[in-house]
Image (spheres, helix red, strand yellow):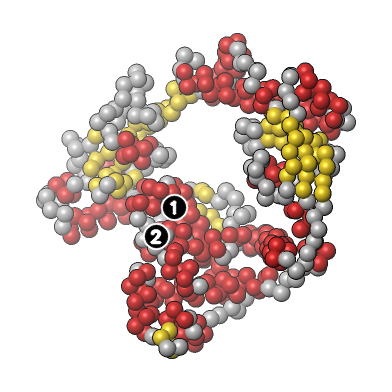
Amino acid sequence: MLSSIRKFSKSFMAKIFIAIIALPFLLWGMGDVFRSGKQNVIVEINKDKISSKEFVNYIQKVQLTNEEIKKFGKSKIFDDVLTNYISEKIISIETEKKGLVLTDKSLREIIFSDKNFQKNEKFSETKYEKFMLETGFTKTNYEKRLRDMELKGQLLTFYSGGIKLPDFIVRDLYTKNNISKEIQYLDLNKIYSNKNISDKEIKEFYEKNKKFFTEKFKNFRYVELVPETLTGKKEFDESYFKKLNEIENNILDGNDFDTIIPGLKGKLKSTGFLNSTKTNENGKEAKELNEDFFKKIFSIQNRKSPEFINFKDKYFMVELLDEKEVETSLADVNLRKTINAQLKFAYILKENKKIQDDIKNRKFGEKEMMLLSKENNIQIDKTKIKNINDNSKFNTVLLNGIYKFNKGQIFVLSDSLLKENYLIRISGEEIPKININSGEYKENIKKANAEYIKKVYKSYDKHVNSKYNVEVNNKVFERIKNSF
């Protein structure tokens, strides 16, 4: 346990480990819970209100770095932190209801028995202190994390402990994943690539869907919150940061732009209507605006609602004044490319479905596959797949699709974006020999148990989601995100 904590203690994934390694199933069914309301409440769990201040304190404890935010993306990283925060709350409630506890004595025994903290087989306070310095933990934080991990383990064991699957289930899974398959396949992309989308088709598609081909333009006003504006001084002193906190609180309380900082005339700046590339309707780019800063403010959704922005150690108050949709002309090269791609996607989808329907209605088989090959002068290829992990020809997603079919079956197989499209026939199969004493088979037992436990967790997930009504105040959440 300690070695894992040591390796990951300073990573972002470690900072939000609770939802990820403990109870991700709690969140699978959570769905679309984001909504607006109550200015200083960010989450309600069964009517228990959690303040935005409490969540901000939690974020500060996570100690996100600029590098982490840049690497993972602000929106995703804060969504993960909030998900984790909610998960922690629910885990705490669940463990308490189940009467799961870890006494101080038990926690002390776990720490004292860790060989990484021992010298001459006895607990060493010096080694323990050294670990804190190396990892950046405080004793309080480390012991809380250790306690959380132990309680989560107890909760998981409560629902999945003692599961031992019958031999026939383990054998079936082993056979299913290790059976080798001989297949014949046609690369349908070699046929579909001959399809050219005409100008007429593009124009017709554009006219039918013109209302969807619009671009959003937004108009903002903003002010940089420098000391001279807030305190009348040039120094970044205590009074300046106190004033910043007051402004942030006023924004979270829902106060309007002009009353938060009165007397800003002459210091306010306006962007005018710009699209996501900082360009106005006449095609002129607002070069004076920093690209990253503009991306940050362009993500603001709520009009007439000021936002507190921290950007490269500078602070701003920004407000979205207005937004509008402007129709994009067919002369736009990127729009034509988009329409062409959409039409090509629709064509492939239609052709795939046509073959699938014929297969379903027993109008398409091996004979028709050979005829399709001959008509398009495309060779039917052959290959042998050793097992479900043999990705020498097909990727993991396609392999999982292939292993849903059996000998003699013919089917169309595609990836989610229709980038890869194959017509496949399984011509032969070879059942693997099972050696129950092999390491591979023993590993399969673990895998079978893990799959079964996952089903238990999914069932528990539904149970949890029926018990806990989680509502997130999206408006407050977006403001908190924009303040970092």
Q: Is residue 444 left or right of residue 57?
A: right
Contact between labelled residues 1 and 2, with CB atoms less than 8 Å apart: yes
Q: Is residue 453 visible?
A: no
Q: Amino acid under label 2?
A: Ile
Q: Where is residue 458? Give x, y as percent.
A: 68, 59
Q: Dot 1 corresponds to which residue? A: 78
Residue 217 bears which disc, if any? none
* Residue located at (59% from left, 78% from top): 100
Res 263 visible: yes
Q: Residue 280: where, in percent of width, then height?
A: 34, 23
Residue 276 x %, y %: 39, 31
Q: Secondary structure at mark 2?
A: helix
> Which element carries disc 1, helix, strand or loop?
helix
Q: Residues within 10 Å of mark 1 (few under 14, many from 20)?
A: some
Which residue is under mark 2? 59
Front residue of 364/201: it is 364
